[in-house]
Amino acid sequence: MIKEHHNHITGMRKTALRFGCSCAVLVCLAAQPTSAQDHQVKALIESPDRATLSAEIPGRIIRIPVEEGDTFNEGDLLVEFDCAMTMAEKRVVLSQINAARIKLEYQQKLENLQSSGELELKLAEADFSEIRGKLGLIDVNLAKCRIRAPFTGRVLEKIMHPHESAKLFDPLLRVARTDAYDVKMIVPVEWREWLKNDQPFTFSTQDYQHKSNGTVIRFGADVDPASQTFQVFGRLNTDTNGDFLPGMAGTVLFGQDAGAE
């Protein structure tokens, strides 16, 4: 047994010398990072888009068909205001446009018969254009009566409720995008030598119940002078995002198996 143990130690010593390590520091073989496959780092899931939806017009809220935690698709109705007054103004302006059109057509006929001066025709054209401009402003305000989802996401906070009156720019809802998730990492500056854009990785939650592949999409603008680290951002695959939520922590693995199904 003693002879076999001596032969095993001798073999390990030869292997260490071949790699440039003494027997006393044989553990350096396992400690030296050889490639990206040896690199792991803690990471945090973030939503790439968050927004606070605000009132673009003052008015009474008549409908908010979502609650906190609800999901929605891009273009879904999220907030609706009472715009009965604006609709009434539009009906008045439409009547004014009709009257202005009749007046303009009459002046054009007189002009053709040379029975009217050029000034009267120009004034009729100006009146018609002015009233059409008012209609355009009303249509813009009517479009603001309904707030639709800017992306596919989830409601983070419901700030105001139906039957409340909102002032201009009052916050109404806080929402976050859920059809894509980013991963934020803080890594040593030395990783800059091999870490590149579009580099694949595998993200695992802390409990290892959920995994997703992803790729590096951008780097932080500077290096922290105290810790000599910098931020790296990745994007998870869109077909696995149902398993994740913003704020989840986990581990990112870079290596030859990263990104593999």
Image (cartoon, grey):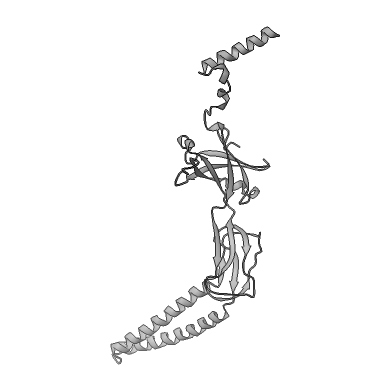
Q: Quarter of the image containing the N terminus?
A: top right
| Spot occupied by residue 177 in the image (x, y as percentages of width and height) | 57, 56
Q: Quadrant of residue 256?
A: top right
111 relative to 221 in the view: left or right: left
Residue sticking out furthest to the front: 226
Residue sticking out furthest to the top: 3
In this picture, is 162 found above or below 42?
below
Q: Nearer the viewer, residue 36 or 137?
A: 36
- Label count reads 0
| Spot occupied by residue 133 in the image (x, y as percentages of width and height) | 42, 78
In this picture, is 37 found above or below 46?
above
In this picture, is 178 found above or below 108?
above
| Spot occupied by residue 247 in the image (x, y as percentages of width and height) | 61, 50
Q: Quarter of the image containing the C terminus?
A: top right
Q: Nearer the viewer, residue 55 or 231?
A: 231
Q: Quadrant of residue 70?
A: bottom right
Q: Nearer the viewer, residue 176 or 186?
A: 186
13 relative to 130 in the view: left or right: right
Q: Quadrant of residue 13?
A: top right
Residue pictured at 37% horizontal, 89% vertical: 106
| Spot occupied by residue 52 in the image (x, y as percentages of width and height) | 55, 63
Residue pictured at 63% horizontal, 9% vertical: 7
Residue sticking out furthest to the bottom: 115
